[in-house]
Each structure stands twice: as structure tokens, then as C-alpha cells.
Amino acid sequence: MTAYPAWTPASRPGIVPLHPFGFGMILGRSFTALRHNPKVLLGFALVVQAVAYIVVTVAIGGVAVASFSRLDTVAPGSDDYDAIMAGSVAITAITALVLGVLSGALSVVVQGIVVAEVAHAVVAEKPSLRAVWARVRPVFWRLIGYSALTIAVVVVVVGVLAGIVALLVIAATWVGALVGVLFFLGLIPLYLWLTPKLFLVPSVIILERAPVFRAIGRSWRLTRGRFWSTLGVVVIIAVAFSVVGQIISIPLGLISGFVPTIIAPTGGDGVEAVVGFVALQVVGQFGILLVQCIALVVQSTSAVLVYVDARMRVEALDHDLQAYVEARDGGATELSDPYLVGVGRIVERPAPVPVGVAPAFAGYGPPAGYPGYGAPVGYATGGPSPAPQSPAVPPGPPTASAVSEPAPVSPPYAAPAPAAAQTHSAPAAPPAVDPPPAPPSATDRPQTTWAAPGSNGDA
């Protein structure tokens, strides 16, 4: 008996189709990817960002209170007062800088988790937080190193430019101010140029397990020819969430100014007014924090989608992903990571066929002599094709039958006569062959009518 394969359902669709997609698809699916796995994407990001925000705020506030409270022990305007003031400001600023860097490191971890989860969501997988972290953990310190490198470069560049401006201000105030404005305006296009070029570095580090500098070069190559679309994604997401943040913060700021007056209209240091003001500030900061978390998730998701689209167009990643999905849904267990299969290869995709032009296939030729088609190679144009010749027969002495009866004429393209029936005669001239009939036109075709069985049309 023949064993038929078992029926298998169609592959589950991911958050994006497995073929190259455009700008609208990247932008739209970056916002809707939150619904695929909200616990990992939004829940983890919100918890980490909230903890980091609370720790940083409490730490900076504690250091500031402890340092500035020493001013109460000295007389204002004295040398000790000025020294304590300068030291308190320096200690608070250094604490804020260090804690800000550590908070940025936590943001990099969130970005890595989002990149790994979205990579699974592309192939319709919904992993747990532990499985996603198992993918991020081997390259965690590379992400931290890239974040530290970025911060160091920014600090050095801004510090050098600020030093130049400060020296110019000391020499000539208006010259320093003008140069400072020019430096600031020059940093804007530099930032807009470097951001799309380095947009895919975290995705390359996580999905390809590449070192930092190799990931930078890889991101630079993958975004070649896609600069404007990548910049458009970055700018639109940043502007959208900036507007949302302002929509939340501005009304809360206006309301917080009226709360003390509403709660304590006669003035004074009422406890109710202080509690209401603090509660309103906490709610406003939580709303802003939620917007920032969503913005981080959406921006990280868009980076993964840009990375996947770039590799689909250059390295045919869509074929690797499709093969992985089909093998997984077919029951295979030992599967290679599809994002590591074709790293660095270059696949030339065929050019699209224009509308109305028939594609060319190997071994296929158009019918000879038909209107609209060229003549085959080796045939003369403008006349009928030559008829094939019968096999040559060696000449011999003529016989009586050959003299009295003319040689039979074979029809065009007829098979040669059997060897026993052939007669020895002189070779004759090739017979004339009529040209092939022209294809019938629409007016010469017979007109037929059709009627349903049982109707009166065929009576």
C-alpha cells in the first residue's frame, strides 16, 4: 500500500510577511508589535525603567540633600560657604552622570530583550522572558560596551567643542557665541546622518553575535541605499512620542499649579496641598515614564524590522526564514538559527518583468512565422521555411520502371520511404512547397452558438 503524508496545517503568520516590505509596513508593524507579546515587550521594559527611575531619583536626591545641608553650618558669603557650594554642586553632578550612565545601560538591556523577542515574532514564535534572556546573555557585555563607546564619543566631542567655545568667549564674547551657535547647528545634521547608519548595531550584535566594531561596519553596509527610509522611521517615531509626551506633561504642569490654590485657598503650608501636589507629580511622571517605555520598545522594534528587510533584499533572508518555518511546522526539532545561515552572502534578485512582456525560459522559442514574433535563428525571414530533404541515395543504372514512370513526390515533412521500396534513380530537384497558411483572422473564424442542454436554443 502507498503511504500518503499526513496533513499539516498552514504555517502560522508572524508579525510581518516573509518577503521584503516597505516603509509603511515597517512603521505600522513597529507600533502593533506590542500586542504580540506584551508581557515581555512592555511589561519588562516598564518594570526596568520604573526601577531605574526610582533608584536614580532617590540616589540623586539623597546625595543633594546630604551635600547641600552642610551650608547651614557656615555663614553665607564666607569662603567656606562658597567652597561647600561648589563641592556640593560637583558631587551632585557626578552622581547624576554616573547614575545616568547606569540607567542607560539598563535601557540597552531593554533594547536587547526587545530585539530578541521581535526576531522570534517574525517567525511566529512567542518565547518566554527566560528564553529571550538566554539569547541576549552571551552578548550582554557587547551591548554595554557599545553603549559606553557611544557615550564616550559624545562626551569627548561635546567637551572639545565646549572648550573651544569657552576659549573664544574669553577672547571675544560675540565670536565665541557665534561659533557656539554654528557648532550646535553643525551637530544636528551630523546626528541625523550617524543615527540611521548605526541604527542596526544592537540587532547585529544580538542576532549575529558580532563584536562591537564588526557590528558597526555591518550596520553601515546594510543601511547603504536605505538611508532616507531609515531616517524617516527614526524621525517619525521620535516626533510622535515627543508630541505624546508634551500632551501628557503640559496639562499636568498646568493643573499642578492650581492644586495648592484649590486645596488651600487661604494659603499656608497645608498638608493636604502638599500631598495633592506630590500625588499629581507622581502620576505625571508615571505617565511620562510609560510613554518613554513605549517609545523605546517601538524604536527597538523598528530597528529589527529595518534589519530584517535589509537582509531580505541583499542576502535573501526571507528564503531562510521560510525554510525554517516550514521545517519547524513539519515537526523538525534540530534546526539552525535562520539569522545565522546566510550572513554576509550577496544574492542577486532577478529584475522585475515589465507588464506585457512574456518572460524568457530556457529551451522555449516562439512559433516561427507567427505575427508578432521574430524568425528563429538560422532561418531566412520573409519566406517559408525549407522542407527537409530525403536521405541521399547513391546513383545507379536506370531501370525501365524509372524511365517510364515519374518519381513520386513526397508530401512536405513526410517520412522517407523504406529502403526496400526505394529505386535507384538520378537525384531530382526538391519539390516546391506551398507556404504555410496564415493564421485565421477574427472575421474568418466560424461563428458558433451555445445553448444550455434542454433549452430551445438547439431545437
Image (cartoon, rainbow, N blue to C red):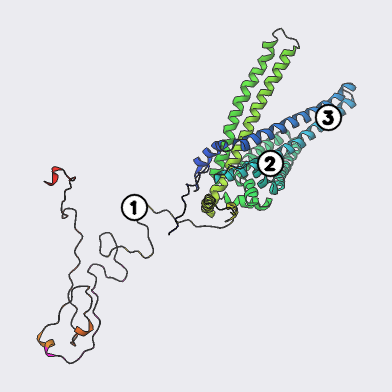
Farthest residue, direction front: 1
Q: Secondary structure at mark 2?
A: helix
Few, some or many residues within 10 Å of mark 1 (<14, 14–19, 20+): few
Confirm or deny contact between disc 3 and disc 1 (CB under 8 A): no
Q: Position of residue 136 (x, y in %)?
A: 67, 46
Q: Give the mark, 2 or 3, whose residue is nearer the N terminus.
A: 3
Q: Secondary structure at mark 1?
A: loop
Where is mark 3, residue-wise? 88
Few, some or many residues within 10 Å of mark 3 (<14, 14–19, 20+): many
Q: Amino acid at mark 2?
A: Val
Q: Amino acid at mark 3?
A: Ser
Q: Is residue 375 above or below residue 292?
A: below
Where is mark 2, residue-wise? 109
Where is mark 1, residue-wise? 356
Report the Cα–Cα distance between label 1 and label 2.
52 Å
Decide whether the magenta segment is chiefly helix, strand or loop. Answer: loop
Q: Position of residue 40 (x, y in %)?
A: 63, 38
Q: Which residues are magenta?
A: 374-400
58 lies left or right of 192: right
Q: Nearer the viewer, mark 2 or mark 3?
A: 2
Q: Nearer the viewer, mark 3 or mark 1?
A: 1
Q: Nearer the viewer, mark 1 or mark 2?
A: 2
Q: Secondary structure at mark 3?
A: helix
Residue at x-position 67% and y-position 46%? 134
Residue closest to the eye, 447 or 224 = 447
50 lies left or right of 386: right
Q: Position of residue 446 (x, y in %)?
A: 15, 54
Q: From where the camera sits, is residue 287 visible?
A: yes
